[in-house]
Image (cartoon, helix red, strand yellow):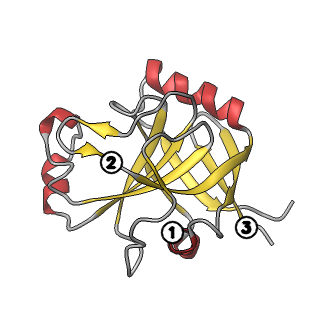
């Protein structure tokens, strides 16, 4: 039986529903599912293109490693990335807490891709494959419109949340 999560933008009042890809990414799905609910400040992708994400302190006792990876996510893909604090400590990334990032051992990036033509390459790090662990099945159009508003209107004060979905 499939498991589902909700993905929300709190201030904008938008929620989408995504199916976990337990067969393709079982370790990543288990790590996320066991830690739900999760959420934090939303950011809009600077390099990848049509992406929103949140950065979280490590919440799983064991990193899932790479599984079901991509560098070309499609609309509706939900991905996990693991970064070290040094990976995100560069002032060019624009995080207000860059020094805090440097002090952290690992940072989990949960990302949602809402449009086409994404490419996961970073000028400092090269290719950045992400684990695709879920796919949005409902609400992508509404979420994409809200994501575009984040790009044009700003991310300050907006939270990206992930929670277990109730059964249909």
Of marks 2 and 3, the one in the foreground: 2
Numbered disc 1: secondary structure: helix
Q: Nearer the viewer, residue 71 or 137?
A: 71
| Residue displayed at 12% across by 51% down | 99
Numbered disc 3: secondary structure: loop
Give the residue number, with chain letter if any, for mark 2: 128
Q: Residue 7 at x, y = what percent?
A: 62, 49
Give the mark, 2 or 1, whose residue is nearer the N terminus: 1
Vertically, is 1 above or below 148?
below
Q: Residue 100 at x, y = what percent?
A: 17, 55
| Residue displayed at 43% across by 28% down | 49
Q: CB under 8 Å between callouts 3 and 1?
A: no
Q: Residue 60 at x, y = what percent?
A: 41, 76
Give the mark, 3 or 1, whose residue is nearer the N terminus: 3
Give the residue number, with chain letter if any, for mark 3: 3
Rounded to the nearest angstrom, the CA distance separating label 2 from label 1 is 16 Å
Numbered disc 2: secondary structure: loop
Of marks 2 and 1, the one in the foreground: 2
Rounded to the nearest angstrom, the CA distance separating label 2 from label 3 is 27 Å
* Image disc number at residue 28: 1
Vertically, is 136 above or below 21?
above
Judge from the rendering whether residue 129 lies leftward or rightward of residue 112; answer left or right: left
In the displayed image of the protein, which residue is found farthest to the top?
Answer: 152
Q: Residue 18 at x, y = what percent?
A: 69, 53
| Residue displayed at 41% across by 65% down | 66
């Amino acid at each position: 039986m499939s498991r589902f999560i909700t993905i929300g933008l709190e201030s904008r009042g938008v929620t989408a529903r995504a199916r976990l890809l337990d067969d393709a990414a079982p370790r990543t799905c288990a790590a996320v599912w066991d830690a739900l609910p999760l959420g934090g400040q939303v950011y809009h992708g600077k390099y990848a293109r049509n992406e929103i994400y949140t950065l979280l302190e490590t919440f799983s006792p064991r990193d899932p490693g790479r599984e079901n990876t991509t560098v070309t996510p499609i609309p509706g893909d939900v991905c996990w990335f693991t970064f070290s604090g040094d990976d995100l400590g560069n002032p060019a990334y624009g995080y207000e807490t860059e020094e805090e990032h440097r002090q952290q051992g690992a940072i989990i990036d949960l990302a949602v891709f809402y449009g086409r033509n994404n490419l996961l390459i970073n000028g400092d790090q090269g290719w950045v494959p992400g684990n695709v662990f879920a796919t949005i099945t409902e609400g992508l159009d509404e979420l994409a419109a809200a994501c575009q508003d984040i790009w044009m209107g700003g991310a300050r004060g907006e939270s990206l949340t992930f929670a277990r979905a109730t059964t249909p």
